[in-house]
Image (cartoon, rainbow, N blue to C red):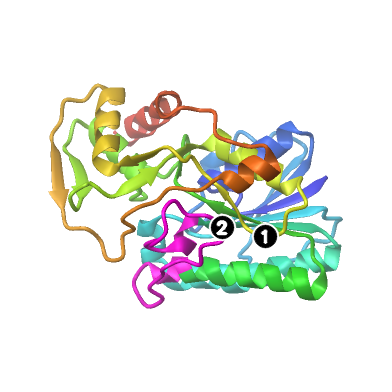
């Protein structure tokens, strides 16, 4: 197929591009490099089936050739990034989704929206099934990301119902792996960088809030399975193994071999107290569940962070 990946130079987007190329597809990466990086896709550029286009899909999107599928991954995704770029985050969720859906309609192409577990906000239901409508503060600082994705989901379903566009929606839970931004503020790179620099690990609040962590290859496999399915309503993709942030900090210390203390700082506004995907639907429809353990995933991730930090020095 001829496939467009918006945000293709980002952490997840680059892994998606890589997987699609291994399956023999022609891939066009569209990115404005607000948070994406050239180095994430430089190893793909020699492939004649890969094309990188610098463009802002929030302003305009066009492609003259045939398009079979569009995967819309363009968006700042870490709290540090979407708090730094709140307007751009809202625009890519609203205008960017509208533009990419318009292109899918014009090209009679399939469409997959990269949504997020953040649509559930600070959930009152645990674990979170796709049927849960969420508990989101629309005017809080995190609302720029949460509501952008909720709007994007509504727009995607509207195009499916009104224009019969062949759409998919994946709700992505915490994911980690090589090519994450080392300074993007998320817990995995934050803890890894602190441990590798032999500095104290910073835990916000009492550390009893929970998260679940999915290795990037598992996530990509679930997304590709969803792309090939006929499911139009949202599907959670993530690892249901839940742990507290304190437990995760201890796992990072063990994986790195760092004997460093843990310090506590105030909890950010609207930080979710729990986060665990209910993947019953993914298991049933996609025959998917994660395979990579946290220990294996960290073993694959740590060398990348060591290399990046060494280059910074």
* Image quadrant where residue 220 sits: top right
Percent x, y of residue 67: 82, 55
Inspect this view and state whether residue 280 appears. yes
Which is more toward the observer, 4 or 310? 4
| Residue at point 27%, 66% (across, down) | 269
Between marks 2 and 1, how big is the CA–CA gap?
9 Å
Q: Is residue 193 above or below residue 163?
A: above
Label 2: few (<14), some (14–19) or many (≥20) C-alpha neighbours in 10 Å: some
Q: Quadrant of the N terminus?
A: top right
Q: Quadrant of the C terminus?
A: top left
Q: Is residue 142 left or right of residue 27?
A: left
Query: Element at badge 1?
Result: loop
| Residue at point 68%, 67% (across, down) | 156
Residue named by callout 1: 233
Query: Element at badge 2?
Result: loop
Q: Is residue 101 left or right of residue 140?
A: right
Q: Say whether residue 122 is magenta.
A: yes
Inspect this view and state whether residue 196 appears. no
Q: Are marks 2 and 1 in contact (CB under 8 Å)?
A: yes
Residue named by callout 2: 130
Percent x, y of residue 96: 62, 68
Percent x, y of residue 228: 76, 45
Q: Is residue 140 left or right of residue 225?
A: left
Q: Is residue 52 above or below residue 260?
A: below
Q: Which residues are magenta?
A: 117-146
* Image quadrant where residue 168 sits: bottom right
Percent x, y of residue 204: 21, 51
Q: Is residue 50 left or right of residue 267?
A: right
Which is more toward the observer, 302 or 233? 233
- The label shown at residue 131 is none
| Residue at point 31%, 55% (across, down) | 273
Magenta region's main secondary structure? loop
């Amino acid at each position: 197929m001829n496939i467009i990946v918006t945000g293709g130079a980002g952490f997840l987007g680059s892994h998606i591009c890589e997987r699609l190329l291994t399956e023999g597809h022609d891939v066009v990466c569209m990115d404005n490099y607000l948070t994406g990086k050239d180095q994430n896709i430089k190893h793909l550029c020699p492939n004649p089936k890969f094309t990188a286009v610098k463009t802002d899909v929030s302003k305009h999107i066009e492609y003259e050739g045939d398009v079979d599928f569009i995967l819309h991954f363009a968006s700042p995704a870490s709290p540090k990034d979407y708090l730094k770029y709140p307007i751009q985050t809202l625009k890519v969720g609203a205008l960017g989704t509208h533009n990419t859906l318009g292109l899918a309609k014009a090209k009679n192409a399939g469409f997959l929206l990269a949504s997020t577990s953040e649509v559930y906000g600070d959930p009152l239901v645990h674990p979170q099934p796709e049927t849960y409508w969420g508990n989101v503060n629309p005017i809080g600082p995190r609302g720029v990301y949460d509501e952008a994705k909720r709007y994007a989901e509504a727009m995607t379903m509207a195009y499916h119902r009104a224009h019969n566009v062949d759409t998919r929606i994946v709700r992505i839970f915490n994911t980690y792996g090589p090519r994450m931004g080392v300074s993007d503020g998320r817990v995995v790179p934050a803890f890894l960088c602190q441990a590798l620099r032999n500095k104290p690990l910073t835990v916000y609040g009492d550390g009893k809030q929970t998260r679940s962590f999915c290795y990037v290859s598992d996530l990509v496999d679930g997304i590709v399975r969803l792309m090939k399915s006929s499911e139009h309503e949202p599907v959670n993709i993530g690892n249901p193994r839940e742990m507290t942030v304190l437990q995760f900090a201890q796992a990072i210390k063990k994986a790195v071999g760092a004997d460093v203390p843990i310090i506590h700082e105030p909890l950010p506004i609207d930080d979710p107290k729990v986060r665990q995907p209910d993947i019953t639907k993914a298991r049933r429809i996609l025959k998917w569940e994660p395979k990579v353990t946290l220990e294996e995933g960290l073993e694959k991730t740590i060398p990348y962070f060591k290399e990046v930090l060494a280059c910074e020095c």
